[in-house]
Every structure is written in structure tokens, then in C-alpha cells.
Amino acid sequence: MRKFGTYLRTQFKRSVRHYPAILAFTLLLAVGVVLILSSLFQSDASEEDRLRVKLGLVGDLSNSYLDLGVMLVQNFDSSQYYLEFVVTDRENAVERLKARELLGFVEVPADFVDAMMYGRDSSVKYVAISGPAVLGSLLVEEVAATISEMVSESQNGLYGYIRYADKTDIDRATRSAKIEELNIDYVERIFMRDKTYEVEVIGQGNNLSFQSYYVCAFCMLMVLLMGTVCVNLLTKSDLSLSRLLTFRRFGSTGQILAEYLPFLAIIGVNLLLFFAAAGVAVGVFDLELSFLQTLEGFGDYLLLGLAMLPSAVLLTALQFFLYELTTGIVSAVLLQILATLALAFASGYLLPLNSMPPVLAAASAYLPTGLAFSYAASLLTDSFAVGTLASVLAYAAVILAAAVAVRTVKIRSSRV
């Protein structure tokens, strides 16, 4: 234990000499993270306006029923929040479509209403420019499929009743009244369809909102990037000291722990400084962060930083293991950067997990970066579980054990 304490103090003193450069990089990194997050949040704030797409409406709308239907859709239907219908002629619609002013246009045939009333087949035509399936096109496709199904099923119900009434002794007045009542019932159900189901917003992933997701992801990414700056501190090209310590019965396990703890302390302190600065900024500038409403002051932000330290433990253990695999500064930097980019992408740090292939999204839960992200997300969603914390610490212990095994093999080898 005395040997461990002496070696640990030596490594801490060595880390202190490297800390100013690491702190300077952390400050620059924090400024960059804040600027990127601000840009993301500002662009997301106008998402509702960007999602409202314009569609042209072409055809003879002089029929009172059709004109009334268009008015109801434009003013009372829930689609008014994401679709805007522009009544125009076909020639103008084609020109505006080519100019990308319209996403597409709907062409209504002249006999559409009469055909609907007498049960004849008739359909509207949707015209759009061919191209990749962007968000607006997918939205219109989903809406068209929903409307088509509603209209078809409503027609089936009405025509089914009419055929049934023709085979019975129901008088014409009663039948007409029932048909009108059935029509009104269908129209009410269609216009009130948004109240027939319950919407649950599950967020971008891990039940996080857009803002919370990227705050969490960028915190984890910042820990990884801070670890890459410690290359001079953790890279070993000469194992003479390690062999001497082993000869003096201070083995690989003690060496790894004594070298890892100062590294963890550096990253942990920087992470706490980041959250402390965020707490001060929120208090001084009176900022309102809707995605962090549960945090009321400096103390809450500092506690959140402390709660996120287990994620830092897992990520730093992973980086320490990667450093242990290398023997030179160049190889260490390359391995750290490549591993950071690959794991950050695979774990949803750059793109939301729900936008990635299902296989990759499922595999991210087994990656150390994915588990660290899930643990941090649980803190922001008030779904903390002791089991997740235990998994994070156990994973970190396994990775450090692997680092011990690598150090043992390197010490026993003949290479320097």
C-alpha cells in the first residue's frame, strides 16, 4: 500500500504539470460546444414553421360541397398546422412546382363530387417532382394514405347502408335523413380524429427531448475529446520503469490504478467546472432552459455534474485502455481520434439513434459509449436506476482489467 501511495502521488504531481494545457483546451472546447448547441437549438425552434409545406389545389371548386370542404380543411382541420393548400389553376401550379414554391399539387376532376354522391369511381391526382424522399414528401405521403383510407372506409359505410336500404321497406325520407346523419357523423369523426388517439412524445432517443439529447451527447463527446489531449500524460514508449516496479513487487494492477486515477481526476474536475460554469451562467444571465427545468440553481447543476461522473469513469477507462494498446504518440493520437469518431457515431452522439439503422441502434446499447450515454440520459429524464449505475461501473472495471492484462503482457515481453 505504501508503494501504491508513493507512485500515486508521483503520478498526480506529473498530471498537475500537464493540467494547464488540458484546461486551456477544455475551455476552448466548452466554448465550441456552447456555440454549436446554441445554433442547433435556434434552428430547432423554428422547426414547426419549416415543416409546414405548401400544396397546390387545382380543379373546378365552384361546387358548393367541394368549396365548403376546402374551407373546412383550411380553417378547422388539424392538417392546417403542417399543410397549406393554395388554390390555383393547373398552369400556375406547374410553374410554381418547377420553381420549388410548391411541394406538389392536387388535381380534382370536374365530376368528383357527383361521382362521390352516386357511388361511381373517381379519384384525385397528386403531382410532384420526382426526387429523393425528403421530410416534406414523406409527410404528404403519410397524410395522403390516411385521407385515402378514411375516404374509402366512409364510402364503404355509406354505400353499404344505401344498398341495405334498397333491399328493405325504409321510405325515401327516412333513408335520406339517415344518410345525412351518417355523413355528418363521418365528417365529425374525421375532423376530430386528433382526439381519438393519445400522442406520446418519446423524443430523439432515450426518451430525451431534442435539446436534452444533444446536451447529453455533447457532454459525453466532450469527455472523449478531453481524453485525447492527455496523450503526453498516458502514452508509454519506454517500459523500463514499469519493469523495475514489477521487479520490486509493485505489479501491473497497482500501476494501472495509480496512473488511471489522476487521469480520471483531470477529466472529472473539468466536467464539474463545465457544469459549475453553466450553473453560474444561468443564474447571472437569468437564462431559461426548458429542457432543464428541474435544475433551479448553481447547486443543482453541480450535483448533476457529480451524478454524471460514472459516465466519465467508463469513458476514461475506455480511453486509458486504448492508450495502453499503443507505444507511441502518433499511434495513440490516431487510435484515439478514430475510436472517438467511430464510437460517437455508433452511439448516437452525432445523429439521433432513431435515425440510424435498427441494427446499429440496438448494438449501441452494448458499447461503452452507448452505456455511458444511456446512464447520463437517465439522469436528465429522472429515470435513474441503480442497475444502470452498476452496469457502468462493472463495464469500467472490466476494461481496466483488460488494461492490466495488456500491461502485464508488455512488461513480460522483450520489447522496450
Image: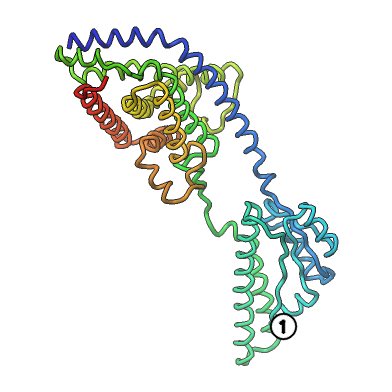
Residue at x 48% of width, y 36% of height:
349
Q: Does residue 118 appear left or right of residue 340 in this picture? A: right
Numbered disc 1: secondary structure: helix
- Depth check, front residue: 259 or 50: 259
Q: Does residue 248 appear left or right of residue 92 in this picture? A: left
- Image coordinates of residue 134 in percent, x first then y, are 63, 52
Residue at x 63% of width, y 82% of height:
159
Q: Quadrant of residue 74?
A: bottom right
Residue at x 70% of width, y 87% of height:
172
Which residue position is annotated with label 1?
A: 118
- Depth check, front residue: 253 or 48: 253
Q: Is any atom of residue 310 visible in this view?
A: no
Residue type, label 1: Tyr
- Image coordinates of residue 19 in percent, x first then y, are 43, 11
Residue at x 44% of width, y 51% of height:
358
The quarter in which the C terminus is drawn is: top left
Q: Does residue 8 appear left or right of residue 230 in this picture? A: left
Q: Quadrant of residue 253?
A: top left
* Image vertical order of residue 392 relative to residue 61, above or below: above
Q: Does residue 93 appear left or right of residue 261 in this picture? A: right
Q: Is any atom of residue 108 visible in this view?
A: yes
Q: Residues within 10 Å of mark 1 (few under 14, many from 20)?
A: few
- Image coordinates of residue 157 in percent, x first then y, are 60, 77
Q: How many marks?
A: 1
